Image: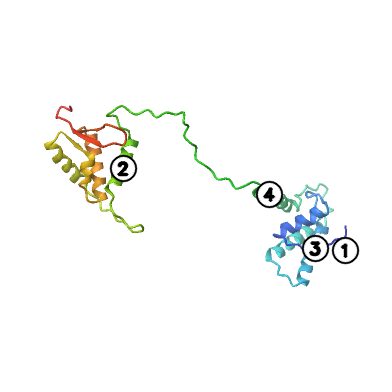
Amino acid sequence: MNKSNLTLELPNFEGPLDLLLHLIQSQKIDIYDIPIAQITSQYLEYLRQMQSLNLQIAGEYFMMSSTLLRIKSQYLLPQNDFVDEIEPEDDPRDELVQQLVQYSIFKKISAYFKERNEEVPIVVSKEASVSTSVKVQPLPKGQITSNELATTFSMVLRRLKMRQPDTASIKVAETPINEMIDYLHRRLASKRQVSFFSCADKMHSISDVIGLFLAMLELSKKHEIRVLQAREFGDLNLERNDVNGK
């Protein structure tokens, strides 16, 4: 096909590779055997038509034209007739062919996802529902897991009903754990068992409650107290251990 027989409608191409791919596909040319002279002439003719219409042409189009002219010039170089054995050289079109093949693949993938996005409705994920057949077995009294401790602590904070503005910058002052350990020692000196809720109700800030909770964990770790719970999410009873651990 001569360039005079080529009709260009000047569509909006996404770049020089898109234009080259259009020229190849519209003429049903084998992408692995591009007639470089023909394609170069058609490509330059397209740029001339764009310039005649006063269209702005990106610099990457001119870079591609120089690449095509370079490949074309390599085919026009004379062969050395004085060498008996000519080693096969790499095809100067290989790099351009690889770019066109990769671009063609990504273009098809992009079209596929665009089509899927238009056909498939919007799906909102949902967390798995808890089966009604699963029955929650309560733990034996006195055995507490870390999750239960965290839940109970959260309930304590809600019970305090500390007034805070809807939007504010909160700075929590850290309360030394040693102070709360001494506080629990004093409470347990007169009583063998005290309520965590009753202790927390006497606190004046979140930092004090946090310090009290950490002090309880520290004394439990040292086996100085035992933490008991009569029911799920109920109060925590702190019981003093004797010297022998009982």
Residue 40 percent location from the top left of the image = 79, 60
Please indicate, yes or no, whether residue 77 appears anywhere in the rendered image: no
Q: Which residue is mark 1?
A: 4
Question: Which amino acid, mark 2?
Answer: Met
Mark 3 against mark 2, which lies toward the viewer? 2
Residue 85: % across, % down: 81, 46
Of callouts 4 and 3, which one flags the residue occurring earlier in the amino acid sequence? 3
- The type of residue carrying mark 3 is Glu
Q: Which residue is at the front of the view, 226 or 167?
A: 167
For residue 115, which numbered disc appears in the image? 4
Residue 177 found in image quarter = top left
Neighbourhood count class around disc 1 (C-alpha, 10 Å): few under 14, some 14–19, many 20 upward: few
Residue displayed at 52% across by 42% down: 126
Mark 1 or mark 4: name the one nearer the start of the chain: 1
**Marks 1/2: CA distance?**
83 Å
Q: Amino acid at mark 1?
A: Ser
> Reading the chain from its start, which is encountered first: label 3 or label 1?
1
Instruction: Point out the frontmost of discs 4 and 3.
Output: 4
Give percent across and percent down for residue 241: 17, 31
State which mark lies toward you, 3 or 1.
Answer: 3
Q: Write down the residue under mark 3.
A: 9
Q: Quick check: can you spot residue 120?
A: yes
The quarter of the image holding the C terminus is top left
